[in-house]
Image (spheres, rainbow, N blue to C red):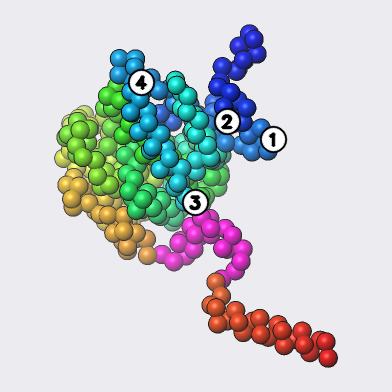
Amino acid sequence: DLTANGDSGLPAELSEKYTLTRTLGKGACGEVKLAFAKGSCDKFACKLISKKKFSVGGRTQMNLSSQVMGEVKILKALKHPCIIGIEDVIDTPDMLYIVLELVEGGELFDKIISIDKYSEETAKMLFYQMAVAIKYLHDQGITHRDLKPENILLASDELETLIKVTDFGLSKFVDAGSMMKTFCGTPSYLAPEILLTAGSGAYTKAIDCWSLGVILFIMLSGYPPFSDERKDMDLPKQIIGGHYSFPQQYWEDVSETAIDLMKKMMVVDPTKRLTFDQVLAHPWLQDEAMKEKANNLMYPEAESMGPPVAPAAKRKISDAASEAEKKRKT
Ligand SMILES: Cc1n[nH]c(N)c1-c1cccs1
């Protein structure tokens, strides 16, 4: 959109490198627009974050802003096939622009609505990628804090596709107002300890385990484990009490092993919840065919090279090749 004098209203640091076009959606911290890099025309998703979110009484807290920048620097260093990559960060007095990797398969949230629910086989390979991605974040000392189907993006329209986790690590910097938004919105994915401590508790990695358990529940059934549509118990009480169930009519086609994993992820006491190492070691994920499919999506270059060859075998191949070459020359 241009103003009357043809000015995009964007800072030169951004407009000299990128052209922003249509809105792709709304992330946790702000609007996301399709961006084209000038010159290469490579496509990106540019997140526009108003710093007013980080201000108190209209004054941007510089230390907070520099903390956010510090956080973004940490996120820039992350590199995983199932984590949305950060291409560029442009910081201005009023706005923060984060240029992110673009994926075009939409959000997991919309996909579940369009297909009702996933088969157990497909849910397993999508969930496996999420668990591997969150384990990677946790190993880097980062807790996502806001895992929900809207923050799981799909690389393509295929049912079995690469997933990308987005909107991580920044939520801890949103101000009280945004924290209120956390509590104003439907807390369907929030772990009990967040509701119990009004968000002031020490968030631990365990909150990501609870949220991912909720996501798996929805992928396999098509409906959430906790809902404000229940008339007998309000939503916070359902979550804080861990009041969820697997009624036969919706769960008859789902294995007991999958249900066992969700029960061990959605434990009210965070100290008793599975770690992501334990999630990945759970029997439901000991499925080599599923892992091969997921790994081929995460590391396609490895797939095209064929199965890995042991070093000794490599030498035999090269020795045989040089022998054959000698014979050809004689
Ligand atoms: C980030 C990112 N990379 N690729 C897409 N589609 C996004 C979006 C996030 C939120 C709305 S669109």
In the rendered structure, which segment of residues is drawn in magenta? 287-307
Q: Identify residue type, mark 2.
A: Leu
In the image, the residue with mark 2 has its CB under 8 Å from the nearest atom of ligand 1: no
Give yes or no for contact between labels 3 and 4 (Cβ–Cβ under 8 Å).
no
Label 2 and label 1: CA atoms lie apart by 16 Å
Q: Nearer the viewer, residue 224 or 195?
A: 195
Q: Nearer the viewer, residue 164 or 319?
A: 319
The quarter of the image holding the C terminus is bottom right
Q: Identify residue type, mark 1.
A: Gly
Residue 250 in the figure: left or right of residue 293: left
Q: Mark 1: give few (<14), some (14-19) or many (20+) Cα within 10 Å.
A: few
Residue bearing mark 4? 60
Residue at x 34% of width, y 45% of height = 142
Residue bearing mark 2? 34
Identify the mark at residue 126; answer none if there is no mark. Answer: none
Label 1 and label 4: CA atoms lie apart by 34 Å
Relative vertical location of residue 242 with respect to residue 318 in this rendering, above or below? above
Residue bearing mark 3? 81
Q: Nearer the viewer, mark 2 or mark 4?
A: 4
Q: Mark 2: give few (<14), some (14-19) or many (20+) Cα within 10 Å.
A: many
Residue 148 showing in the rendered view? no
The quarter of the image holding the N terminus is top right
Total numbered labels placed on residues in the image: 4
Q: Identify residue type, mark 3.
A: Pro
Q: Residue 193: where, in percent of width, then height?
A: 19, 39
